[in-house]
Amino acid sequence: MNDGGTRLRMPEEPGEPLSERARRLLAVAEAFATANVLAIGDAGVALPFVDILDALPDFIYVKDRQGRFVYANEATANAHGFQRAAEMLGLTDFELYPMARAMEFHAAEQQLMAADETLTVVAEQLAAADGRLLWRHTTKAPLKNAGREVIGLVGLARDVTDRAREHLLLQGQARLLEMIARSEPLPGILDALVRLVEAELDGISCSILLLDHDDRRLRTGAAPSLPAAYSQLIDGISIGPGVGSCGTAAWRGEPVVVSDIMSDPLWADYRGLAAEYGLRSCWSTPIMTAGRHVLGTFALYSGEARSPGKRETDLVAMATHLAGIAVERQRTEERIRFMAHHDPLTGLPNRSFFEERLADALDGARAGDCPLSLAFIDVDNFKVVNDTLGHRAGDTLLKELAARMDASLRAGDIAARLGGDEFAVVFAHRSGDDREVDARLGNLHAAMSEPVWIGGEMIAASCSMGVAVFPVNGDTPEQLLSTADAAMYRAKQSGRNNVQRV
């Protein structure tokens, strides 16, 4: 037999296959018709089996050749918004569904009856009378009289919304894990996650807020269904013990359920904002790493004053777990990329990354016909610090000097640790006045010659600097580094703690 319907591909529920149940239903329906148990015509006969059908949760109905309902059990009637089954009699799908959907049903059923032997099993999504979207397994079969003429159809439908939603949820989770595995951009992953949860819950809007790098403020990660103006207003909100649901959840590191925003003290400073956008309750749960470090929050908003049920709680547990995986993976990848280009001790660019950036800076200098100065820096007597105070003290000294270098930079400048106790700084001559750059180099040398406190002990610091200028002293990164290095060695030979130019 042909299957003329569309179907949601889900695992069959345990027990008897649906097609076999449908064949039995067809046999029973035909037996009723031939025995005049249920007449299709001017009059219907109410017999005890009708009471049995009304007691079933499944939807059972019969239509004539024109698609009019001639029988519907109470479950069918109630699902369509009627109190009594008799109210459905004589109606067609055109009075019950939007035109496009009604035409789809009517065409499929007319084809089914014309084919005579066709049994159609479909999984279809329908809007309930209250607006909820439901999934039903539906079996429709031709109904024949004693003369084997098709006089209508009999239908059996079962609400499988929970099973369908679970299946769709599993599919959604699988898609999200694939997105994470492919290292797709985090905003897209978080947006898909929020939409997946929202599709499972009626009347709920979700948001993901992520802690910034100093763990003090929450930034919007995804909130596709919340009013954009509201999301903008809370973007960058500080975390704290009384900062709404999300700020408090991130502060405490535990879920915060606010059933009524208008009366909860956590929302005292934000009630007006929530009321403006029709938000009445908000339940926020921290997104955690495996080590229990807070990454952000996952929140559910409702326009009603209420608490979450088990369904919401289970979905949030799933969502925070996936969000944690996605955020932690992205940050791990960011750390790996950073470590590939930066010195792990000081955080400055390493030699290879510095040479790349220097090449780019030289291209810009050529295009703008603008000089550029490169300072090669060597920390004086660094070995003495390591030998007398230990490597930890030496590391502290290098980090402090690197921080001073970094603080001297302006937009377009570059600082790097080349290795050991060697550093480099590039200054662009943006004003066209070489004296300004000379002054900045002098200020940098002075800053790096200030004492450093290590473990309560003051350490005298100094450095030797060699300076090369593009294009006078070199045209490539290699030439500039080589000439600046040579100038630095002259500074060493001149008694250290001074600046030498080529």
Image (tube, grey):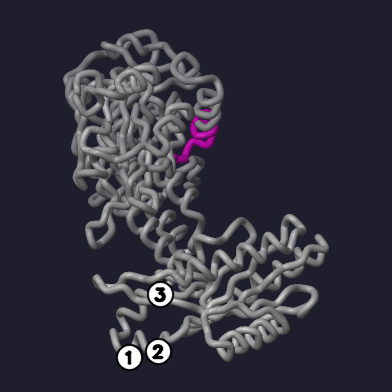
Q: Residue at x 31, y 26 (%)?
A: 302
The amino acid type of the residue labelled 2 equals Lys
Q: Nearer the viewer, residue 31 or 335?
A: 335
Judged from the image, the secondary structure of the residue bearing numbered disc 3 is loop
Question: What residue is pinned by disc 3?
Answer: 345
Instruction: Give whichever of 25, 137 is nearer the camera.
Output: 137
Residue type indicated by callout 3: Leu
Q: CA distance from mark 3 to mark 2?
A: 17 Å
Depicted 41 relative to depicted 162: above or below: above
Q: Is residue 370 left or right of residue 40?
A: right
Q: Nearer the viewer, residue 305 or 314?
A: 305
Q: Earlier in the sequence, mark 1 or mark 3?
A: 3
Kindly give the residue lying farthest to the front in the view shown. 495
Q: Nearer the viewer, mark 1 or mark 3?
A: 1
Q: CA distance from mark 1 to mark 3?
A: 19 Å
Q: Residue under label 1, please give it.
A: 387
Alpha carbon separation for disc pair 1 and 2: 6 Å
Name the residue that disc number 2 marks.
Answer: 383
Q: Of circles 3 and 2, which is in front?
A: 2
The x, y position of residue 324, in whole percent, is: 33, 55
Residue at (83%, 63%) from the top-left corner? 369
- Report x, y in % for residue 298: 32, 42
Helix, strand or loop under label 2? helix
Whichever of callouts 3 and 2 sits on the residue coming sooner in the sequence is: 3
Q: Which mark is residue 337?
A: none
Are the two marked residues, 1 and 2, in contact with CB atoms closer than 8 angstroms? yes
Q: Position of residue 19 (x, y in %)?
A: 35, 46
Q: Could you say which quadrant of the image residue 41 lies in?
A: top left
Q: Is residue 217 left or right of residue 418?
A: left
Q: Quadrant of residue 77?
A: top left
